[in-house]
């Protein structure tokens, strides 16, 4: 799935930039978030929620870095004449999923902290 797209009008060329090897590193913390989300159903304690929140933060940071790196690579293509660089569907899905993971983890951690504190 492309993360950024470069389109040059002069030679009618379109180049799509995929995430490359960094997408493999995004999978590990994202799977960790899913596994710890399942674990919180059984053990809704603050420590499990904290690990989930940290993994979600790492996932979100990696997704944003990947999206910015892809758009930067697309911007680095040299072309004479009019060209346009844009985010592609991979960046949109990745960033939205990262934000949702982080937000739900933050809510879960806040709820666990509230329950723990009384």
Image (spheres, rainbow, N blue to C red):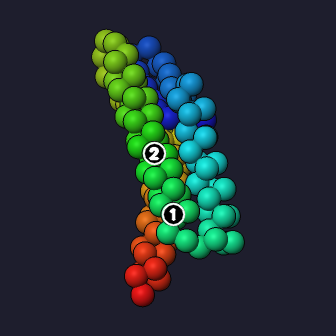
Could one spot residue 92 in this view of the protein? no
Q: Quadrant of residue 27?
A: top right
Q: Up-down: is 118 above or below 42?
A: below
Residue sticking out furthest to the left: 81
User: Which one is in front, 107 or 87?
Assistant: 107
Q: Up-down: is 87 above or below 34?
A: above
Total number of numbered discs in the rendering? 2
Q: Quadrant of residue 40?
A: bottom right
User: Which one is in front, 85 or 44?
Assistant: 44
Q: Position of residue 54 (x, y in %)?
A: 46, 53
Q: Quarter holding the N terminus? A: top right
Q: Tell me if mark 1 has few (under 14), some (14-19) or many (20+) residues whose alpha carbon lies within 10 angstroms of its own.
A: some
Q: Position of residue 23 (x, y in %)?
A: 56, 33
Q: Tell me if mark 2 has few (under 14), some (14-19) or many (20+) residues whose alpha carbon lies within 10 angstroms of its own.
A: some
In-image side of 82 versus 105 (left or right): left
Residue drawn at (47%, 83%) of the image = 115
Mark 1 or mark 2, which is nearer the start of the sequence? Answer: 1
Residue drawn at (30%, 16%) of the image = 81
Q: Secondary structure at mark 1?
A: helix
| Residue highlighted by disc 2 | 58
Q: Up-down: is 114 above or below 39?
A: below
Q: Up-down: is 40 above or below 20?
A: below
Q: Position of residue 56 (x, y in %)?
A: 49, 53
Residue drawn at (55%, 25%) of the image = 20
User: Which one is in front, 106 or 16?
Assistant: 106
Which marked residue is nearer to the observer: mark 2 or mark 1? 1
| Residue highlighted by disc 1 | 47
Residue drawn at (39%, 29%) of the image = 69
Q: Position of residue 26 (x, y in %)?
A: 55, 39
User: Which one is in front, 111 or 18?
Assistant: 111
Q: Secondary structure at mark 2?
A: helix
């Amino acid at each position: 799935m492309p993360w950024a797209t470069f389109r040059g009008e002069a030679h009618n060329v379109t180049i799509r930039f995929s995430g490359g090897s960094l997408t493999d590193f995004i999978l590990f913390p994202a799977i960790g978030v899913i596994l710890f989300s399942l674990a919180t159903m059984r053990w809704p304690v603050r420590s499990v929620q904290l690990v989930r929140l940290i993994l979600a933060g790492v996932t979100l940071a990696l997704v944003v870095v990947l999206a910015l790196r892809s758009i930067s690579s697309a911007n680095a293509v040299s072309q004479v004449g009019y060209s346009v660089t844009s985010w592609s569907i991979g960046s949109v899905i990745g960033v939205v999923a990262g934000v949702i993971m982080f937000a739900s983890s933050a809510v879960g951690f806040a709820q666990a902290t509230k329950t723990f504190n009384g």
